[in-house]
Image (cartoon, helix red, strand yellow):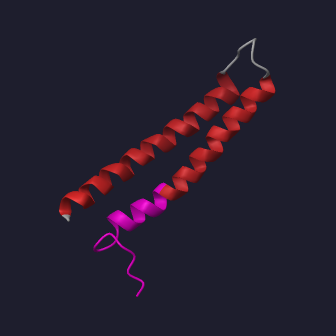
Amino acid sequence: MGENRIMQQISAIFSVFMVLFYIGVGCFFIFYFKNSFVDRAVIVIMGSTFIFYGIYRAFRSYVQIKEIFFSKNGKNEEN
């Protein structure tokens, strides 16, 4: 039981790093990626998609971290 909880905690922390990665790549595409053979609209669409997915993943990571780190046994105890 304890090993599973440790793996969940490691996965939650890794998920935070992936959030930073997705938002960073999205910002890179929108603000810094200057390429002549790819249309600017396509770059902005790709960057926006990365940023929105990063925001979605940040919300899911927040819920997961709250559940794993701040509950007694890793499950919601609303009952």
Measured along the vertical axis of the image, is residue 35 above or below residue 7?
above
Q: Residue at x 39, y 67 (%)?
A: 67
Measured along the vertical axis of the image, is residue 63 above or below residue 79?
above
| Residue 56 covered by magenta stretch | no
- Residue 40, quarter of picture: top right
Tell me the quarter of the image containing the N terminus: bottom left
Between 3 and 13, the residue placed more toward the observer is 3
Indicate the position of residue 57 as horizontal and vertical percent values. Answer: 53, 51
Between 27 and 50, the residue placed more toward the observer is 50
Indicate the position of residue 75 as horizontal and vertical percent values. Answer: 36, 73
Question: Is 50 situated left or right of 36 in this image?
Answer: left
User: Which residue is situated farthest in the top direction here?
Assistant: 36
Measured along the vertical axis of the image, is residue 31 above or below residue 67?
above
Q: How many marks?
A: 0
Q: Residue at x 65, y 27 (%)?
A: 29
Question: Is 43 situated left or right of 79 in this image?
Answer: right
Question: Is 62 situated left or right of 68 in this image?
Answer: right
Magenta residues, start to end: 61-79
Tell me the quarter of the image containing the C terminus: bottom left
Indicate the position of residue 55 as horizontal and vertical percent values. Answer: 59, 49
- Residue 24, quarter of picture: top right
Q: Residue at x 38, y 81 (%)?
A: 77
